[in-house]
Image (cartoon, rainbow, N blue to C red):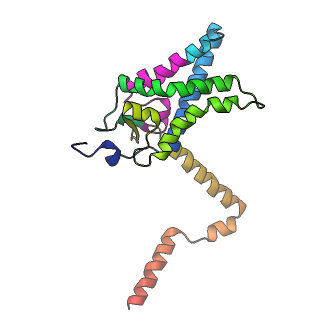
Amino acid sequence: MFDFEPAYSRMRLGFVSQRILAFAIDFFGCSFVSQFIEAFFNIQGGFRLVVFTLIWFFVRVFFASGNQSQSWGHFALSLKVVDMSNGRPVGAIELAKREGCIFFPLFFLLISLQSFNYQSALPLFLAMPLVVDIAFAFADTRKRQALHDRVANTIVVMSRRGLQLDQKLANLSRRIGKARQRFADPDEYYQRPTRAYREEDFYRRRNRRRY
């Protein structure tokens, strides 16, 4: 039992969709860097997986521990990993526990991508451990902890520090939708009453009813 209110009940938890997108940013970012290093040093065979592993742990553990528990993806989406009890950013040891647990599902995902075949169900079977890990976060509506979060006793919360990339993309998509609607039917768009006009009309009608 906690002597004070735990962090998961007083801090804004990150959405599972945000965490998946942050994971994808880290995955593709590490893949790009590893492929560049492999091409530059002409690395082949099983050493390619070793290079990716080193880059992954560097970004998700060492870089994040010195960046207020934010990896590349977490910083892009304004998320951070904190201790479940006190809400403080965790260090390299807790991050290593998380990544040590999640790397095994990721390892099977890498194998499935290397042996991808449309006629075989093996890649889908090898990707199941990662799906199970993420399923824990969907099932846990209170803490939104994935399996690797439970091992390290951590949660992922929203942070003021970051790029807020998802919100910027949502605002851009909203503006594009309004622009398309304005160009598609300008007469109907400009004839719609604004919010301020609707509120003014509402208060005017309510005052009439009083008198």
- The question of residue 76 being in magenta is answered with yes
Occupied quadrant, residue 24 = top right
- Residue 66 visible in the displayed image: no
Residue 22, percent across and down?
A: 52, 35
Q: Residue furthest bottom?
A: 211
| Figure check: 5 above or below 103 | below
Give the residues drawn in magenta, as a range: 53-79
x, y percentage for residue 88? 31, 35
Q: Which residue is drawn at the image coordinates 50% and 45% (left, top)?
A: 138
Residue farthest left in this picture: 3
Percent x, y of residue 107:
57, 23
The quadrant in which the C terminus is found is: bottom left
**Residue at image x 30%, y 38%?**
85
Q: Nearer the viewer, residue 195 or 49?
A: 49
In-front residue for pair 72/94: 94
Q: Is 207 displayed left or right of 172 in the figure?
A: left
Q: Nearer the viewer, residue 18 or 103?
A: 103
Q: Quadrant of residue 180?
A: bottom right
30 inside magenta stretch? no
- Inspect this view and state whether residue 25 appears: yes
